[in-house]
Image (cartoon, helix red, strand yellow):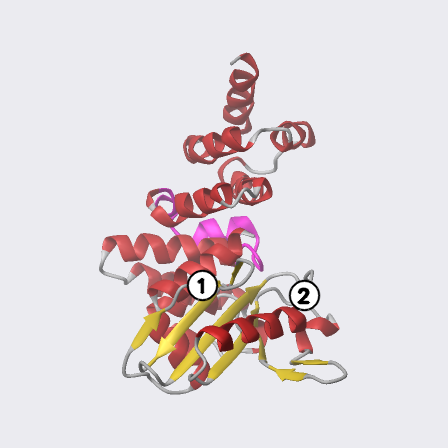
Amino acid sequence: MSIDNVCRYLSEQYPESFATWLLGRTPADVKDLKTELSVEPVRADCIILLNPQEEILHLEFQVAPVSIPPMPIRMLDYYARLRRQYSFYPIEQVVIYLKETTANAVFIEQFTDTNTVHRFRAIRIWEQDPAPLLASVGLLPLAVLARTDSPESLLSQVAAQVDMIEEPSQQRNISACTQLLAGLKYNNNLITSLLREELMQESVVYQRIIRQGIEQGKREEALSVVMRLLPRRIGIVAPELRSQIEDLSLTQLEDLSEALLDFSTSSDLTRWLNNMVQI
């Protein structure tokens, strides 16, 4: 999912913020460790070393409540691999569920088998107090998914704080992450009315997400991002246009992800698709 890549980006760029939020203390020093674990290649979302030689924080970000293999088995697998590589460090594991659901899977915090019990933490972002997230630039995009009685007011508050970020590239990237995560909860019209569209267009995060999906050989990654952003540029995508987009190759989806930033109507998309057919 593109959402996973947004969260990986945030946790890689702002590991201190995530550690402070999740552990309740500010580490003296952090180091982002390689997320590819030994034996058969398995990539974790984020692995952070806190205060060298003290503790490892392992994060997994999850949109869907169910995964294959199930999340408890995955967390046990990650733990065993981490323990093999970093045998002397305590390991704290946290799964952060991003999309609100009542599915039982998001409440499970341990794997139990005949000879094994393995525990981890499960955080449902929609139950979290937004205050700690609003207090850190690196956590602002997650704040839009936090607990609130007034979603529009919360999104407006986040947008106002994004506008106050002084460093231009940081502002563009945080805005892009915020807009993509907000798509899990809010309608596109509200998002575009509160968050500046041009910041998304100028952000390197957007293209990074597309590239990561392509590099990982996940065509659905690029398709997912394209179908999320198109309605924000041209409104509702007609079924016949959607069908044509779903038939595009990976390379064509990459080209469309760049071209759509200049679209303003469905006619622009139609012309682009017609040109693709003629090439």
In the figure, residue 167 lies in which quadrant? bottom left
Q: Is residue 242 left or right of residue 193?
A: right
Q: For residue 86, what is the image quadrant?
A: bottom left
On the question of residue 147 being in view, the answer is no
Q: Quick one: label 1 or label 2, which is nearer the N terminus?
A: 1
Label 1 Cα neighbours within 10 Å, binned few <14 / some 14-19 / many ≥20: some
Q: Which residues are magenta?
A: 182-201
Residue shown at 35% from the left, 44% from the top: 198
Camera-nearest residue between 90 and 165 = 90
Give the Cα distance between marks 1 and 2.
Answer: 22 Å
Q: Amino acid at mark 2?
A: Pro
Please, what is the dominant secondary structure of the magenta stretch?
Answer: helix
Q: Position of residue 146 (x, y in %)?
A: 52, 72
Which residue sits furthest top? 278
Q: Residue at x 53, y 68 (%)?
A: 60
- The answer to whether residue 38 is magenta is no
Q: Is residue 142 above or below residue 259?
A: below
Residue labelled with disc 2: 65
